[in-house]
């Protein structure tokens, strides 16, 4: 290669120096397919570089969505403006001008004369305030442009009250003539016939049976009223071919059907135009959420097409590759979550087993202590019985004079119940006094054990022990907490007022896990919705419980998130009780 030289066509004439490859070979997109070499893995990006790429992708997507949204908004506005112009043109097509009217003619006369062509929405006559008479002209607004067109064609020059009236279009009609002609051209694509002056008792089937003699009918519709089963006296019939349409118009116009003359003419509006010329049009807008979602989808498709064009590939192949990668990532994440869940379940099962063993040991200790106490009572009772049987003389003395009060076993402490006052002696009082003294001694011994903490006591003994005052209760609570192993430090973080109930979706758990992973290993995330009352419209409080791998991580998350401003809300972060969380009690 070093001896080759290019010819004299303006190229390099000298020998080509040897090209040495330095560094690793990196094959870009398409290199594996074109060069036939195995692609070498790209160097792994650092954290800052990955964040920079993510920000760049996010910015590019935002700009694409913004541009697409602008285009969609512009197209929607143009469509709305065109629709508004067509509606305004329909309003003008429904209006006719009537001039050279006799001054004695009133609105009811005009309504009777022009009513057979179709329903009239309004009649406007200009009145002279001095003469209290109209100025000789009026404007009539029909519901449909077809009725106005038939009235214009058939009533111009008609003789009414001694005058030949003039019927025409309003003077502002030429302003919308272009749109009117466009509507009329669209109507020529359909073989539709307008039929007016239909008797109120005739049905759709009656009209269809009369007009189907001219050809096959595709549709036959009568305009309905608000009352079910009634119509407004006009309708539209669409034929399969143009010849049938023309035959029906020439044969049925001014035909007497049911005592009324039909008014039949060619439809001048397409079927998609609702013939409600006088009604106002509300300018609808696309909802913001729908527009943004549509723009995001469009921008994503455009990005795929651009990448496919640059690489010379099919966008469908790129999409399939992305779906494969996403599925692999989802499966990996699902597997990790399942492993974490199994690990947590094993730990909780082990802890439950330990607690169960502890309770079993406590119950066995209780039973053994109860047996020993019963034996001691039996021994003491037997001893007292033998002493009384060996010495009968004191019993005879007890019948004659009262016995002295029994001496106390030991000075009673301030926190236990004092023995009952001495009373007159009766047979068997010594046995009762001995039992009372023994119980007092046992109570005193238990209190000493609780204060020293040197020996464990059973639950039965702790329940039977009579306590008095805050100090004794405090001792018992400390002993019970010590029996359970003490309060464990919690590794659960509770987040309140972070989101509302309407913001809870499938992606919230992943977002919370991603956000809290900054403070430590997140093992589980639970989203709990708590209804504040039984009413249907009661407030729903959303609590988010995040279980970390270590209690220090939960404290770190609490210190960082508590009081933080998130989505218009102030987050309340607290460390939740570990025992309540494991028992699935989320109500505190």
Image: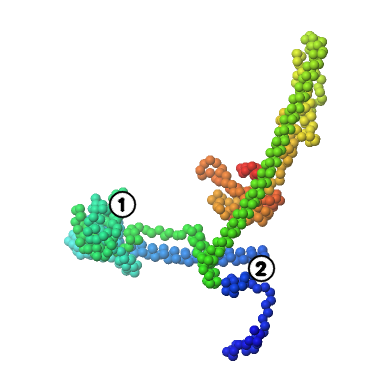
Q: 566 or 399: nearer the eye?
A: 399
Q: Please state if 507 lies on the left or on the right of 489 as rendered.
A: left
The residue carrying pointer 2 sits among few (fewer than 14), some (14 to 19) or many (20 or more) residues within 10 Å by Cα, namely: few
Residue 575, can we see it? no
Above or below: residue 271 compared with residue 502: below
Which of the image's four quarters has the N terminus?
bottom right
Which residue, given by chain and number where applicable, does mark 2 sit on? 43
Q: Quadrant of residue 580?
A: top right
Residue situated in front as seen by the camera: 198 or 381: 381
Q: Is residue 476 above or below residue 400?
A: below
| Label 2 SS | loop
Q: Earlier in the sequence, mark 2 or mark 1?
A: 2
Residue drawn at the location 41% of the way across and 64% of the way down? 79
Q: Which-is-in-front pick, marks 2 and 1? A: 2
Q: Nearer the viewer, residue 444 or 473?
A: 444
The C terminus is located in which quarter?
Answer: top right
The answer for how far apart the CA atoms under marks 2 and 1 are is 74 Å
| Colour logic | rainbow
Q: Which of the labelled discs sits on residue 225, or is there none?
A: 1
Q: Position of residue 564 (x, y in %)?
A: 64, 53
Where is residue 340 shown, x and y percent of the image?
65, 51
């Amino acid at each position: 290669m070093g001896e080759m030289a290019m010819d004299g066509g303006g190229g390099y004439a000298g020998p080509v120096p040897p090209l040495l490859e330095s560094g690793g070979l990196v094959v870009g997109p398409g290199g594996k397919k074109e060069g036939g070499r195995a692609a070498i893995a790209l160097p792994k990006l650092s954290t800052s570089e990955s964040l920079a790429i993510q920000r760049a992708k996010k910015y590019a997507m935002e700009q694409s969505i913004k541009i697409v949204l602008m285009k969609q908004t512009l197209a929607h506005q143009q469509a709305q403006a065109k629709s508004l112009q067509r509606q305004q043109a329909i309003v003008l097509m429904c209006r006719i001008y009537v001039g050279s009217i006799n001054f004695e003619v009133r609105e009811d006369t005009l309504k009777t004369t022009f009513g057979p062509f179709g329903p009239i929405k309004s009649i406007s006559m200009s009145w002279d305030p001095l003469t209290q008479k109209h100025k000789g002209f009026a404007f009539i607004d029909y519901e449909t442009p077809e009725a106005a067109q038939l009235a214009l064609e058939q009533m111009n020059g008609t003789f009414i009250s001694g005058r030949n009236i003039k019927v025409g279009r309003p003077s502002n009609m030429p302003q919308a003539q272009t749109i009117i002609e466009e509507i009329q051209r669209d109507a020529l694509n359909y073989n539709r016939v307008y039929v007016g002056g239909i008797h109120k008792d005739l049905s759709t089937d009656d009209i269809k049976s009369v007009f189907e003699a001219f050809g096959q009918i595709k549709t036959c519709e009568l305009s309905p009223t608000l009352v079910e089963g009634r119509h407004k006296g006009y309708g539209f019939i669409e034929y399969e071919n143009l010849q049938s349409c023309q035959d029906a118009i020439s044969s049925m116009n001014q035909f007497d059907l049911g005592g009324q003359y039909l008014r039949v003419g060619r439809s001048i509006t397409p079927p998609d135009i609702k013939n409600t010329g006088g009604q106002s049009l509300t300018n609808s807008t696309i909802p913001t959420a729908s527009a943004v979602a549509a723009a995001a989808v469009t921008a994503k498709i455009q990005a795929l097409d651009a990448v496919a064009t640059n690489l010379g590939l099919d966008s469908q192949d790129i999409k399939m590759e992305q779906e494969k990668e996403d599925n692999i990532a989802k499966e990996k994440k699902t597997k990790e979550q399942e492993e974490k869940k199994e690990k947590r379940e094993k730990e909780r099962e082990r802890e439950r087993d330990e607690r169960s063993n502890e309770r079993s040991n406590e119950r066995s200790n209780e039973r053994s202590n109860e047996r020993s106490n019963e034996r001691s009572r039996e021994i003491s009772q037997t001893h007292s019985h033998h002493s009384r049987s060996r010495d009968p003389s004191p019993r005879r003395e007890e019948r004659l004079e009262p016995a002295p009060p029994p001496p106390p076993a030991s000075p009673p402490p301030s926190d236990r119940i004092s023995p009952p006052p001495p009373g007159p002696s009766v047979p068997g009082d010594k046995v009762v006094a001995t039992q009372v003294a023994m119980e007092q001694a046992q109570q005193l011994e238990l209190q000493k054990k609780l204060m020293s903490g040197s020996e464990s006591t059973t639950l039965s003994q702790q329940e039977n022990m009579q306590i008095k005052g805050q100090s004794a209760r405090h001792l018992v609570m400390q002993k019970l907490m010590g029996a359970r192993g003490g309060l464990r430090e919690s590794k659960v973080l509770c987040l309140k007022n972070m989101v509302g109930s309407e913001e809870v979706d499938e992606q919230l758990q992943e977002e919370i896990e991603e956000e809290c992973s900054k403070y430590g290993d997140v093992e589980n995330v639970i989203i709990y919705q708590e209804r504040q009352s039984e009413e249907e419209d009661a407030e729903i409080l959303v609590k988010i419980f995040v279980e970390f791998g270590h209690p220090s991580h939960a404290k770190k998350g609490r210190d960082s998130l508590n009081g933080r401003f998130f989505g218009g809300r102030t987050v309340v972060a607290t460390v939740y009780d570990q025992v309540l969380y494991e028992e699935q009690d989320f109500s505190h």
